[in-house]
Amino acid sequence: MCERTDAPADKGDAPINDPLLTTPVARLMALAMGTDIRVFDVPAERSVGLAGLVGLGSDKNGEPKCMIGLTSGLDDDLRADVLAFGLAVLVGTPEILDESPDGILGISRHRLPQADHGPGNLAWHMLQTCGRESPSTTFQLMIIQSDE
């Protein structure tokens, strides 16, 4: 994986270059909104051990909708990393959601070593574009067990 020495957001040549979108999280939220992906908060007490969720749900009309849930209480850096990873899963490897009976996977708080390919690598590139350096943007995906 190549390492970048310049931060594109600082030079003003980032693809998402809006002065109101000053943080990586704001830039990634704009990307999610622009691609019709719903991002919502998950209460920390309902998501022990998870940084977030990624999957398919439905909107008010019952139409399928891609969604990313972020656990409340994440710091801005981890929030950006998990959001980028969720976006990368939905865009790059949506077939992985088939592993879950309900189409939703948990994103563990446990970071894996940085991937050279797949959603972790795509997330790394998205964050670079947003001006964030991250130790790893690869997380473990988990099937969520129901309480029943």
Image (cartoon, grey):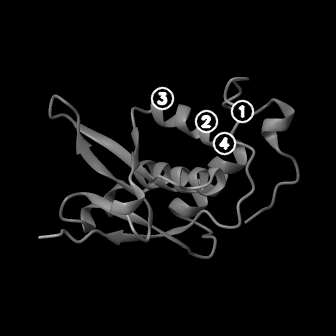
Residue flagged by tag 4: what amino acid is it? Pro
Cβ–Cβ under 8 Å for marks 4 and 2:
yes
| Front: mark 3 or 1 | 1
Asked if residue 94 is positioned above or below residue 36 in the image, the reply reads: below
Q: Quadrant of the N terminus?
A: bottom right
Look at mark 1 in the image and give the residue it sits on: 22
The answer to whether residue 70 is left or right of residue 14 is left
Residues under numbered marks 2 and 1 in contact, where contact means CB atoms less than 8 Å apart = yes
Residue 106 appears left or right of 71? left
Distance in Å between CA atoms under marks 3 and 4: 15 Å
Is the Cβ of the residue at disc 4 closer than 8 Å to that at disc 1?
A: no
Provide the residue designation for mark 2.
26
Mark 4 and mark 1: Cα distance apart in space: 7 Å
In the picture, residue 47 is in which quadrant?
bottom left
- Tell me whether circle 3 and circle 4 mark residues in contact (CB < 8 Å): no
Q: Return the mark for residue 34.
A: 3
Question: Is the residue marked by circle 1 packed among few (<14), some (14-19), or many (20+) residues within 10 Å?
Answer: few
Gap between marks 2 and 1, in whole Å? 7 Å
- Identified at 87% across, 47% down, the residue is 6
| Residue for badge 4 | 24
Q: Amino acid at mark 1?
A: Thr
Q: Which is nearer the N-term, disc 3 or disc 1?
A: 1
- Does label 3 or label 4 sit earlier along the sequence? 4
In 3D space, how far apart are the residues under numbered discs 3 and 1 (Cα atoms)? 17 Å
- Separation of residues labelled 3 and 2 (CA atoms): 12 Å
- Element at badge 4? helix
When the figure is inspected, residue 137 is found, relative to residue 24, above or below; the finding is below
Q: Percent x, y for residue 144? A: 28, 68
Q: Along the polypeptide, which appears first: circle 3 or circle 2?
A: 2
Image location of residue 42, percent across then percent down: 38, 51
Taking depth in this image into account, of 26 and 86 the one nearest to the observer is 26
- Give the image quarter of residue 102: bottom left
